[in-house]
Amino acid sequence: MKNYKFKINGKDYNVTIGEAEGKMLSVNVNGADYQVELENAPAAAPVQAAPVAQAAPAAAPAAPKAAGAGVTVKSPLPGIIISVDVKEGQAVKRGQKVAVIEAMKMENEILAESDGTVTAVHTRKGDSVLEGADIVTIG
């Protein structure tokens, strides 16, 4: 595992990069675990290393959290949430705007990926988010 400290838009992030298993990588950002899909899978050697294999149990709890909780709409890029356009319990249609994120001085609409009801809102106006951060969950 490798530890890094980043400062993005004045906010500090502690990042730990863990096990790579195929195209999936375990990452912890400020105490929150994420499974990241890599576009270019690393060489097989890091997966075979003994210390990396011991990290597998730590990544396991992330999978059940996503399963059965509905579809989580994630941030496509790092930025600042400038509006959240839905509330918990609200019905949404696929393609409906659920939030707007500002990144690189451009506003980007975040759209619902499926029809359903908003079961959780994970961000609020003014939040800084990383790529892949949960925005809303639709059940």
Image (cartoon, rainbow, N blue to C red):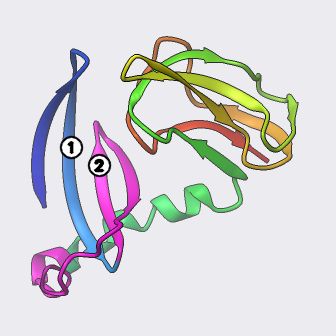
125, above or below 49, in the image: above
* Secondary structure found at label 1: strand
| Residue range of the region highlighted in magenta in the rendering | 23-52
103, above or below 77, in the image: above
* Secondary structure found at label 2: strand
Q: What amino acid does circle 1 point to? A: Val
Location of mark 2 (residue): 28
Q: Residues within 10 Å of mark 1 (few under 14, many from 20)?
A: some
Which numbered dot is residue 46? none
Q: What amino acid does circle 2 point to? A: Asn
Could you tell me which residue is drawn at 40 percent across and 16 percent down?
Answer: 105
Q: Is residue 65 left or right of residue 102?
A: right
Residue 60 at x, y = what percent? 42, 68
Magenta segment includes 47? yes
Could you tell me which residue is drawn at 70 percent across and 29 percent down?
Answer: 98
Which numbered dot is residue 15? 1
Residue 71 at x, y = what percent? 69, 52
